[in-house]
Amino acid sequence: MRYARERLRWNGWGSREVTFETKGRDREVWDFVRQAVGADALPSTPPTPLDQIDLPAIRLSPAIVEGLGGVLSPDRVRTDAYERAFHALGRSYHDLLRLRRGDLRHAPDAVVYPESAAEVLMLLSFCEKHDVAVVPFGGGSSVVGGVEARGADGQAGVVTLDTTRMDQVLEVDPVSHTATAQSGIYGPVLEEELAARGFTVGHFPQSFEYSTLGGWIAARGAGQLSNRYGTADKLLVAAKVATPRGEWRTLAFPASAAGPNLNHLVAGSEGTLGVITEATVKIHPVAESRRIAAFVFRDFETGAAAVRALVQGEVGAAMIRLSDADETRFFGEFRNVIEPHGGASKIAEKALSYAGFADKCVMMVAFEGGQRQVREGFRRAFGIATRAGGLFVGESPGKAWWKRRFEMPYLRDPMMDHGVGVDTLETSTEWANVPRLYRAVREALAGAMKSVGSGGVVMTHVSHSYLDGASLYFTFVFARDVSRGLESELAQWKTIKEAASRAISEHGGTISHHHGVGIDHAHWLPAEKGTLGIDVLSAAKAKLDPKGVMNPGKLVRAGG
Amino acid sequence: MRYARERLRWNGWGSREVTFETKGRDREVWDFVRQAVGADALPSTPPTPLDQIDLPAIRLSPAIVEGLGGVLSPDRVRTDAYERAFHALGRSYHDLLRLRRGDLRHAPDAVVYPESAAEVLMLLSFCEKHDVAVVPFGGGSSVVGGVEARGADGQAGVVTLDTTRMDQVLEVDPVSHTATAQSGIYGPVLEEELAARGFTVGHFPQSFEYSTLGGWIAARGAGQLSNRYGTADKLLVAAKVATPRGEWRTLAFPASAAGPNLNHLVAGSEGTLGVITEATVKIHPVAESRRIAAFVFRDFETGAAAVRALVQGEVGAAMIRLSDADETRFFGEFRNVIEPHGGASKIAEKALSYAGFADKCVMMVAFEGGQRQVREGFRRAFGIATRAGGLFVGESPGKAWWKRRFEMPYLRDPMMDHGVGVDTLETSTEWANVPRLYRAVREALAGAMKSVGSGGVVMTHVSHSYLDGASLYFTFVFARDVSRGLESELAQWKTIKEAASRAISEHGGTISHHHGVGIDHAHWLPAEKGTLGIDVLSAAKAKLDPKGVMNPGKLVRAGG
């Protein structure tokens, strides 16, 4: 296991040794954020230390806890406060609200650390027999309630099954370009081991450093270079899934017409059908070359049309990322506060304004591959982007983004320390509907923030694009009303979230492009999948998990 | 509907107006075939005319037939001999054996022609109520028993639901590059209507002229240009499926993390969950340029390694097709019999032999796209193929193949007239396993043909390749033992087929790369999907088709 749990934040992001870097310009940074959310002052809202929090009593009987120890070994069954707190929730905004206020009512009764598929099978069998809910947990970075340690009514308790001791690369096939690994392997460990053989999976979600192979697949995640390497469901070649009914395997075929492709039932199952214990995924030779170019566009619609032209024009980009004007401005100014640019930069900004790019939207296009492939791709992208109204602004914005691409989650913790809320949500839709959905969700977010008495910023980007459509990723930053306690804060968030989810659902978007369903989106799922779609998923669950012990309350329930 | 049923062969391939062209060299052709299968003489084995065949009595009561007419209109419920015969079976070798011998015991009791999704829903509801099996039928080109009009025990009869009057293109979205059409549209009609708008689906299975959009998806087919346009499951963006429980829809999202992607339960469902009535699929601008280059390799393993190098080298080919030495030789000589080449060609063959290509394997690589893209792809392919041991032999073999690419199924009928059996089967596996599986299946086929007392030819090609592996397509031609009646002939075929299927299953192949499961492969499916995988599919079926009226006996059964 790469990260001992005590080296990580139980109530925030990532490593305790890393904090968001403001380079000594703390005062300026928070002044900027204060103005952005329209607040007169930012309150100090530090988290409650764990030793001041009362955890709920352990509901599991000592006999069951001892039984779990018998299945594994006693040292791999943890019931201490830190382990229970660390595994209570995911890392969404409202999870952090609760963790920081010390609301640990959903802490698991025990945390177990199996080391093999066989141990997971034994655990599930034991838990099913004793009616104990099992919550699979990899990196725990879910932002939709996917790992919240809740059981169902009538269950004896909740065990969180932490997969991160199952972290071995089992096989690398340099001929078939596939690798098989245990599911609990963290992104960086998997990539390091593959890099030593000259390969990469190429899956780099923003959570990359603290998420696992199994989590990527279970939640159908998407990495920043998905244009080249595909989303997590497309990486998957074969899986081993431990279910209460036994082991369910899919085999590795490059393509097959032997009935429906059940890998696509594994991907997105979010631990509700079983625990993914091993996965075989596609790998690619480490790219010999990389290049990231940046362009600016006059407005989002023009930029989005350029993204479409690039992807439909088959330029072969690894990433195409377009920020709208609000996001471009916010992060531009934010970065300027931390690392003030000289006068030359200001003159350049002014020139852009005069040229009609006052509300500029920046687009980054990355290429990876052979040198000639990258050069040719860039050449074509330059032509298409320019003809689509883009102005090439060099490679430094892209390089700067690349360096900081896993950093943003660290900014949320100090934001929360300063009474500022920040959350994200995402969707996707067909190209023809992108402008309409963009406007609808933005308006819903802005309106809802206003309705709960907060100013705020709504920022949007397209980060994943396809021949037929694109994702839309929304970040909203707002002044929290910290004066009235946790429930009020959760209600404030919920008002905003519901408004956005409704706008997505009613305007042709999927309820999630890559965050998943979890608890938060479960009640939006029937509108998207239809009654029969939900019935089919429920029937699969009833078959594999007849007693409903697997990750209760997420995605679908048994029985239908 | 493009093809009135009476214009098509009820007991053979395609249009009655088209026959395989031997250009007046009939005697030479059959002499060549005779030698190839090692027979002393080829018997004359013409098919039994329909008017000499007794069809089974219609089991459905007149009231039910009338009821079907009430749901649709009486003229769209057919019970005449031609319609029943046409829809009795698919078009596999052993289907043709039965059709040609007049074994129509599995003819449906009635054939219905709905024209809309709403009519299909009403039909299914009616049939479920009256315990009537429903067999969805598009082009009817299944070669695995997928459309055989069989009911289950206790059912009142069998209705074949012919989708080909549902043949409208409903929407073309030139922005999102998707098109929505009714499922019964034939390939050429769909392509013509899209071509008029500048688009193509790019799905060209060998059955293209006589297969339908819904059939492609239901059976997870693959087209000849799948390297560029993807297999049928990858084309699918959204589907409307009529089930006995009502309409099941999937929505069009370019990507989503909202639970498992249920399009992948629709694709490959083979009519066992319901009838696909409409499908939204990806479309692409018609390519501005196309080029097909041919190379020869010294042996199959070298050629397969070159295919791998091309696809993993991301040359962006639309098709890479490698024939082994036996296939290259057979079709080369066969073609020479029909269109004798001059002495120059013979000298070229001789020169190739001296150069070490006596057992040459031909590979064709096709590119489609923008002119520059095609040129660049070809340039890279030339380099990779040459370095991998390939010898460029020009563009004429590819051009000749392109012209005849939908012609081969027409050859089977005259083969059968001459007492010659020809069947095909296919699989796929990871690259590392391609040579082993190739050898195992070839040996199984050759051994089994010998065991049933026939000489014969086994030919193999790779026609679909992926980053992680490739398909293997086997054609076997053998002398039928026509002296002992239908059952004996079916047994002869079954011996060969079972030997090949066992070799596939035991050597890491999928039981089908693109033909599907149907009846023929159903008993091999549990080994591939596992007990739990079959259970999950059965649970889905039990939910959508609780009385088991949908395409009984194919793929999986309700209940599990």
Image (tube, coloured by chain):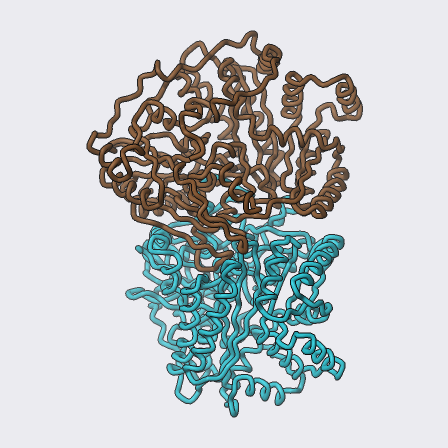
Chain colours: A cyan, B brown
- Say which of B400 and A524 sits in front: B400
Estimate the x, y position of residue B291 in percent, counting from the top left: 69, 38
In the picture as drawn, the residue positioned furthest to the top comes out as B40
Could you say which quadrant of the image residue B274 lies in? Answer: top left
The residue located at (48%, 32%) in the rendering is: B210
| Residue B305 can be seen in this image | no
In the picture as drawn, the residue positioned furthest to the front comes out as B196
The quadrant in which the N terminus of chain A is found is: bottom right
Estimate the x, y position of residue B314 in percent, counting from the top left: 67, 47
The residue located at (42%, 11%) in the rendering is: B484
- Say which of A156 and A425 sits in front: A425
A215 in relation to B404, above or below: below
A150 in relation to A34, above or below: above
Could you say which quadrant of the image residue B547 lies in? Answer: top left
Q: For this view, does B192 lie left or right of residue B84?
A: right
The residue located at (47%, 13%) in the rendering is: B481
The quadrant in which the C terminus of chain A is found is: bottom left
Estimate the x, y position of residue A67 in percent, counting from the top left: 38, 61
B206 in relation to B477, above or below: below
Q: For this view, does B118 lie left or right of residue A506?
A: left
Q: For this view, does B114 lie left or right of residue A353?
A: left
| Residue A374 can be seen in this image | yes
